[in-house]
Image: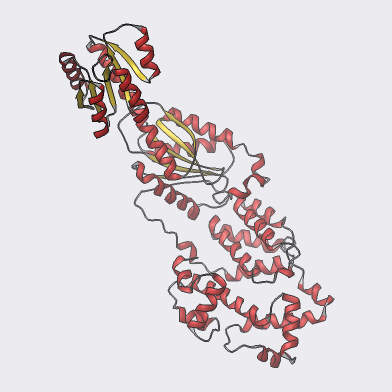
Amino acid sequence: MIRVMIVEDEPPILRRIKNMIERYDPVFEIAFTATDGAMALEYMVQDPCDLVITDIRMPVMDGLQLMNEIRIRYPECIVVVLSGYKEFDYAAHAIRNQAIDYLLKPVSEEDMIKLLDKVKALYMRFNWEKKINTLAGQLNRSIIKKALNSANNKDSLGVFLLNLGSVLAIATYFLSDSYWKHVDLTAIYEQVESFMESNCTFFIEFAGDTPNERIFVYQSNKEGPSVLANSVYKHIKSISSIPVFIACLTEEIEMSEVRNSVTKLRNCLLYKARIGQSLFWSVGKNALINVDSEKEYNDAETVQKIYELFKAGRFRQSTSAHRELLQRFIKENWTHFRIYELFSEVITLFKIEPEKKFIRPLSQFERDVISAVCFATSLEDLEDRLCSIDELVINPAEEIQKNPGSKIAHNVKRYLEECFTQQGLTTQVLAEEFGYVPGYISQLFKQNFGMSPMNYLTRLRVEKAKELMKENPDILISEVAESVGFINQHHFSRIFKKYEGMWPSSFKSLGL
């Protein structure tokens, strides 16, 4: 509804204009009529109007003064000047004060219809611009492109999320990745924009979380929103060899629903996409996405194997090992996100190692591994990226040869890893097991691993507890404590909070 106020000091003219507007289109509602500018301003304060049609020559406050006040106080209000004076100065002044048109009395039916058509189109464009800016604020994303081919009263929208290459690409590392330096994303996006302009009443293109992601909100000429999204998917596949991932809603939604819908679509791609395999996925706005199924796998043995290969600096040489791994990904249809979780667990194992053991910073190694996984656009690309990662740690066998005491320390470490579930495990127990006094064992262990045996044992137990809670969400905290070797639940909870910054119950509820 477009709310109108007519400001005219001659009642017959005011009535004629009012009748013409009411006859033309019910979308226009006469909210107020006023006989001077001061009265009109009072009405605007009470309830601002969308359109003000005002005479120029009036008592108390004339139309030019009124226009100036409206421009300052209500910049979104559309103003039309009405006057019997043909002097150009009045028209020029009115235009400078942002009137959209200037009509001469007596106003004909034809001129009024032309004016109202113009106002209607302008109002709808203003209204859409306002909604678009609100939506951009809700999404917290910049607008890349917008095109409004025709105005209408329809508020329902189609939404799809477009991702090129990889659904896990990391914005921070994007520009430094060698693959993306040679991909012309701009050319692909321009093709999509051209396609959208030809097939949409309007569309808005928002920046995504990464340069290879875009969010499209639109109204389509096609039968349904998913029909257009699928056409875009096929179009991109026909012009580019890069993997294409699109998730869309099967029905239209209100603008207020867009933000949550984008999150839902992003989760669809996150939990469904596979490395190098283009995907089109449509989902109902109220449909549930099973995001927990990916967490039911137990890949501890695989994690340990990869960890040992990296730790010994033998991953790139073990061709059979990583080829076997890739074949497993293919055979078991692993998603990209599951592969990411696998290598994240490998990194977690390295984090319980002492920093001094690394020949380069762990943070750098972590970045290399995670980037390799997240930016991979095919399984072959993943293999190449992982094999190009520099060795992280010194080979334990070489270290033992250089330092005989290191063998004792490594034997103690292995013993702790095998017996961490045993309660009452102390340095005295280690002394009895290995035949050295507790102080000497602690000294050797700290020289090699940067921490005492008991500190290492505690860190190890906390990491094992985290794994146990991930694999068994319904497990009791007391059962976790007992399973990893703590004397009681209270002691375990205090230690866990000290190392992880949260209670075990909070860790479980977050599903980390």
Q: Place residue 439 in its image quadrant.
A: bottom right
Q: Place residue 84 in its image quadrant.
A: top left
Drawn side of residue 448 relative to residue 500, left or right? right
Residue 148 at what x, y percent from top left?
A: 41, 28
Front residue (pair 376, 495): 495
Front residue (pair 468, 278): 468
Colour style of the rendered protein structure = secondary structure
Asked whether the viewer can see residue 31, the reply is yes
In the image, residue 280 sits, relative to residue 408, either above or below, namely above
Front residue (pair 222, 99): 99
Q: In percent of the image, x 35 and y 44: which residue is there? A: 256
Q: Place residue 38 in its image quadrant.
A: top left
Q: How many marks?
A: 0
Residue ranking furthest to the top: 86
Q: Classify the position of the N terminus by image quarter.
A: top left
Residue 229 at what x, y percent from top left?
A: 44, 39
Q: In percent of the image, x 28 and y 18: which residue is there? A: 62
Residue ranking furthest to the front: 60
Asked whether the viewer can see residue 282, the reply is no
Residue ranking furthest to the right: 402
Residue 289 at what x, y percent from top left?
A: 41, 56
Residue 450 at what x, y percent from top left?
A: 72, 75
In the image, residue 347 sits, relative to residue 264, either above or below, namely below
In the image, residue 450 sits, relative to residue 379, either above or below, namely below
Q: In percent of the image, x 77 and y 68: which residue is there? A: 394
Drawn side of residue 323 relative to residue 207, left or right? right
Drawn side of residue 479 relative to residue 26, left or right? right
